[in-house]
Amino acid sequence: MAKRAWRQIRPILRALTRHRTAALLIVLQVALTLAVVSNAMFVVGTRLVHLSRPTGTDEKNLFVVVNQWAPDLDADAIGARMRGDVATLRRVPGVADAFASEAYPLEGGYGVLAEVKREAGQTTKPRLGIMYFGDEHAIDTLGVHLVEGRNFRPEEVIDLPPGSDAAASVVIITRSLAHKLFDGEAALGRTVWLSDGPARIVGILETLQGPYAGSTTRSIDEDTILYPARSMSPTMGTVYLVRSQPGALTSVRKAAVDALWAESRKRIIDPESGVVTLVQAREHGYATDRSVALMMCLVSVLLLLATGAGIIGLSSFWVGQRRRHIGVRRALGATASDVSTYFQLENFLLVGAGVVGGSVLAYAANISLLHLYELAIMPWYILPLAASALWVLGQAAVFAPARRAARIAPVAAIRNL
């Protein structure tokens, strides 16, 4: 059976040369569809991986209070307010722990980008890290895992009023940043140089995602630094991160805000956006990734449907045009299976030609995307998957016209000419 099918390749190729324009249109449509769908599959895959990554924190029990200060408060007054606020939050029933910072995971910005050097006189390009301010309660509040070293000590936490040249002597970094800084060598106890001076690494976190949820900083999303400091800037405001006891998040959110207002009215907490859970931050931070993935899926489905419709239309047209040819073949002894196989094999060859051309277009498009966005080279298995989908689509699309051609009776075909 297979041998009889392959014997039809030469007649199929001769027939296609007499319908060059129609055949070329199908090949070009398949090539364009393969190029778009394969890159769309790759982008969707990278987006899904990106938005499903864990932050390393206890997300389901974490929420954030975004606090802005009244304009008449100076740095000293803000420092006192921050200490009082954090102590108040820790006393709220249902609160496991709390600390003050300038940003939080998946916020969408506001993290401090820090240049990190291995040596004071390093001339090569420094590594970039994303810095969170925090104190000795930061690790417990975030729920992150300290895999090496120790936590901050209270005396190591410094105050940073505007214009201060104070510098912390220690830092805690993530394993991702440690690996990049020291090429897999032990990082605990080593000294790194930040913009304000040297700091010793006293702890290594398993992972802690930065505040930039988008794709612009994807390569350093997990290269995070915990810096033992309190920022006392009147203009930047303060972010209070609060971890509730399991199951107490809903009640604790309102109680925490009420406790802050009772502590002091010289603050601004937006009633709509001033309190954010980490779950909400994830949904908001990855909204663009979800939209892009959905749009790419929709474009791919529409292109596949258009390609399938084109194959059905062209195959149906060719069946009508070849009634005499089909009738003669049937009269000479061709079976219904031979006729059906002819059209299916013809479609297989057309799609195959489109796959070859589409593969070149797909990699050309991927290389272009490398220069525009922070994407990797498309994995080798994407093209075979997309090509297989197109071959299956082509065979499904040509099935009905092929069956219709196989049902043409020899006498009826010749009589109607």
Image (cartoon, grey):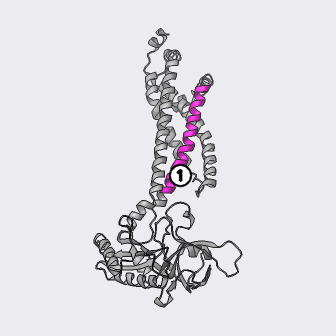
Q: Which residue is mark 1?
A: 42
Residue 212 appearing in the image: yes
**Percent x, y for residue 125?**
68, 71
The relative height of residue 18 versus residue 93 in the rendered view (above or below) is: above
| SS for callout 1 | helix
Residue 21 lies within the magenta run: yes
Dominant secondary structure, magenta: helix
Looking at the rendering, which quadrant does residue 91 occupy? bottom left
**Percent x, y for residue 60?**
36, 69
Q: Residues within 10 Å of mark 1 (few under 14, many from 20)?
A: many
Residue 280 lies within the magenta run: no
The relative height of residue 86 versus residue 279 in the rendered view (above or below) is: below
**Percent x, y for residue 322?**
52, 18
**Percent x, y for residue 7?**
57, 28
Q: Which residues are magenta?
A: 20-47
The relative height of residue 372 versus residue 99 in the rendered view (above or below) is: above
Q: Residue at x 60, y 51 (%)?
A: 369
Q: Residue at x 29, y 77 (%)?
A: 94
Left or right of 390? Residue 95 is: left
Viewer-proximal residue, 273 or 172?
273
Residue 392 appearing in the image: no
Looking at numbered disc 1 in the image, what kind of residue is underneath it? Phe
